[in-house]
Amino acid sequence: MDTAGMEHSVSWISSNSDELILRSWISSRMDIAELHRAGDDIKEMMKSEGYYSEPSKYEAELSDGNITFAYSYPIKAFEKFLGYYDRENRIAFNPSISMRTDFSFCLAACRYRKNGKTDTVVLDGYADNKYYKKAKFALDKFRSEYSINGSFDFYIKRYRRYQKAKGLSESSAVAAAVSRALISNVFGDDAAKDDIFVSRYARLVSGSGTRAAHDGISMWLSYPGMDSRDCVAFKVGKSNENLNYGVFPKYSDVATDNAHSIAVNSVFYGTWVSEKFSNVKRLISDHFDINDLLKIGENDMLRLNSILMSGGLIIQTPDSLRILKEILKFKSKNEGFYFTADTGPSIAIFSFDRSLIDEFRENVNDEYIEGSYDFKGYNNRMRDFIREAQEYFTQTPGEDEEDRL
Amino acid sequence: MDTAGMEHSVSWISSNSDELILRSWISSRMDIAELHRAGDDIKEMMKSEGYYSEPSKYEAELSDGNITFAYSYPIKAFEKFLGYYDRENRIAFNPSISMRTDFSFCLAACRYRKNGKTDTVVLDGYADNKYYKKAKFALDKFRSEYSINGSFDFYIKRYRRYQKAKGLSESSAVAAAVSRALISNVFGDDAAKDDIFVSRYARLVSGSGTRAAHDGISMWLSYPGMDSRDCVAFKVGKSNENLNYGVFPKYSDVATDNAHSIAVNSVFYGTWVSEKFSNVKRLISDHFDINDLLKIGENDMLRLNSILMSGGLIIQTPDSLRILKEILKFKSKNEGFYFTADTGPSIAIFSFDRSLIDEFRENVNDEYIEGSYDFKGYNNRMRDFIREAQEYFTQTPGEDEEDRL
């Protein structure tokens, strides 16, 4: 889409006035047309390097009462994203890249009700209005795209290897699991195996969910003014199983729901976003070199924290700051030891040299979850989960059946 | 100086190749000519609002063995600065603004030795090479400007209202006190009373020292490509004695000597600096409105921390982060309560409403120094200090006298 198309594309962005005021404020600080051109360049590079594929199409085959299941693991981002260019269509300002981790997993069950009027969502046993609104936003878009009537019930559960933590991208796993369960329900198994297709609808629940639809290393292609059907994640590399990784799970009660808007409002946001496009171009030409990714992961953690701090949102805690300072001290004496964190105080560490991780952990005896590349753990919980979900669906007749009772 | 002059002026910047590499890297990220124009505009505004005065001239009247004394109090910055455009001449990239505080004071004694070959510096009883090199840099420039031969001995002492803390601008008070003692020694009392003249040479010791040469609120005029004789601080307002202020002194062992270069290397530095010029223009037209200054002080603390964090330098400590989070929580429920900090973890708070400060301190019982506008405390220590300094000077004959012994 050339820049002329940009003007056209800008018009279909939601007419919600706050969004347009924010949009004009952003355009005054960023060269949106330049980001659009850079995004198009990246798309072309992804094509020529064989990472990109055209948006696929599937035919809906709906059947009343059909129940489907899916799982997903969370990601840990290297090139991160905060801030939507087009909030309505969940199009982020910049492409982002991450790897799959096994710090937790999410199981999702989806039931279709042909005559249903209201979707229902239960997450970890709770039916919170916040979950319902998030699901409804995504499902309404999905239904309108495929002219589907009826409603969907979701029974979702997260399985953590830690008690409580923030910044471990649990929402990415939820988004990918519910999207895959939905797609399996509506389009069948082939579509559900198409990670790119799954990522398109995971996006409507959580941006990083796009990447959680893939194993290994993946990139969510997203930039201002793009065609939203292209706004999906592509796999760009296998997990690098020689890379030791783990995380210090930390919790914080600081709400980060407004992190996206705080970031976009930061005076530094334009610089932060535009640097990412040059990083991504370099990464594509180097076939997503893992060492480059690890350095970007460190840099971008510091910059993400800087962006939010400049807007008054401090996401580290005294506890996580202590660990971060230990990491920086250790790094000043050791090469090949990396760290990153997303929008929370849980800090992940990486090294190809296992002894470096062990040596570091001698000074920091906080709770530590050792990461692995075994993404089969969900199997042990699937049987119980299926039983629980079916129990839930039977207890939740949904209004259409209530009318007939 | 018009932009044509910019090219000329750029040439006299030191030929030190690192500096030129950094300079070209900076110019690629910032519109230096634009900053120069904005600086010139600010200078004109300062003139028309009556804050500016032409650089004054004094005649040196040296007398061998002459000893002079001076004092100074530290500042707390609102519009802050990090990063020198011209390190050799200590010209900062942007103007900066602060108020005098009484968290500590510094006393300085200066002796001139006509045949002396080596300057000597004792600070708090220590003769550290770091102090000597800093003094020599400034004194060599001073001597060459006024074709002065001989050397200077400095006996300097800091008097704190806390045990140990970082980020309370002690270096600003040292710079202003030694500059005033030097100027009193070489040019006599009139020159020593000329705070603007004192600020010019305090600059060569520490940038914020320019502002510590003034009482009340002052602005250091500094911008790329300016005439260095204009690179001084001007008083821009009296202390606002209705403003209650104080500080939680905190220490950190994180070295911040490289804070200037880390800041300049930050990807966000250009944006940070250019925003300051628009702030300063607004402030001049509003006659340095204290509420605007207080808001800038908060914003700029967060941005300064962001800039350094984006370069991997984290200046907060787990302890100071705890207080900062308490402050942000308290601010979300209370108007008229402000905070700021400079390049360290000591956080200052301000309010015109004394009860807000008392209420806040009910949740935070860390050591707290209540600020005042009584800048006479130094008098009680002057007599002992004079005796100590004279004792030091008599024990330190200096090599010229050694030759004659």
Image (cartoon, coloured by chain):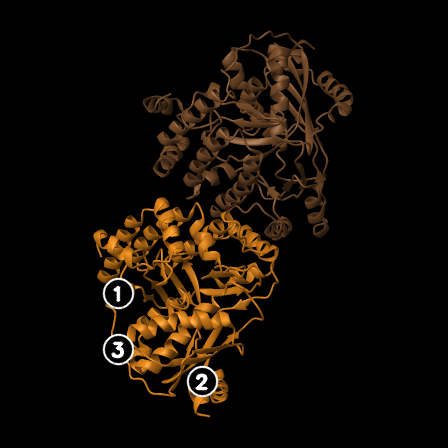
Chain colours: A brown, B orange
Residues marked 1 and 3 touching at CB (< 8 Å): no
**Residue type at mark 3?**
Tyr
Q: Secondary structure at mark 2?
A: helix
Q: Secondary structure at mark 3?
A: loop
Query: Local crowd at mark 2 within 10 Å, few (<14), some, or many (≥20)?
Result: some
Q: Does label 2 or label 1 sit earlier along the sequence?
A: 1
**Residue type at mark 1?**
Tyr
Along the line of sight, the residue nearer the viewer: B396 or A270 = B396
Residues marked 3 and 2 touching at CB (< 8 Å): no
Residues behind callouts 3 and 2 on a single chain: yes
Q: Does label 1 or label 3 sit earlier along the sequence?
A: 1
Between disc 3 and disc 2, the foreground one is: 2
Along the line of sight, the residue nearer the viewer: B388 or B295 = B388
Residue for badge 2: B399
| Total tally of numbered discs in the picture | 3
Residue for badge 1: B52
Residue B285 appears in the picture as rendered? no
Between the C-alphas of marks 2 and 1, the distance is: 43 Å
Please report the residue visible at 35 percent of the width from the left and 68 percent of the height from the top. B238
Between disc 2 and disc 1, the foreground one is: 2
Between disc 1 and disc 3, the foreground one is: 3
Q: Residue B237, relative to residue A104: is it above or below?
A: below
Q: Residue A155: x percent and y percent?
A: 68, 22
Please report the residue visible at 61 percent of the width from the left and 63 percent of the height from the top. B366
Tell me the subunit letter for badge 2: B
Residue for badge 3: B58
Residue B304 appears in the picture as rendered? yes
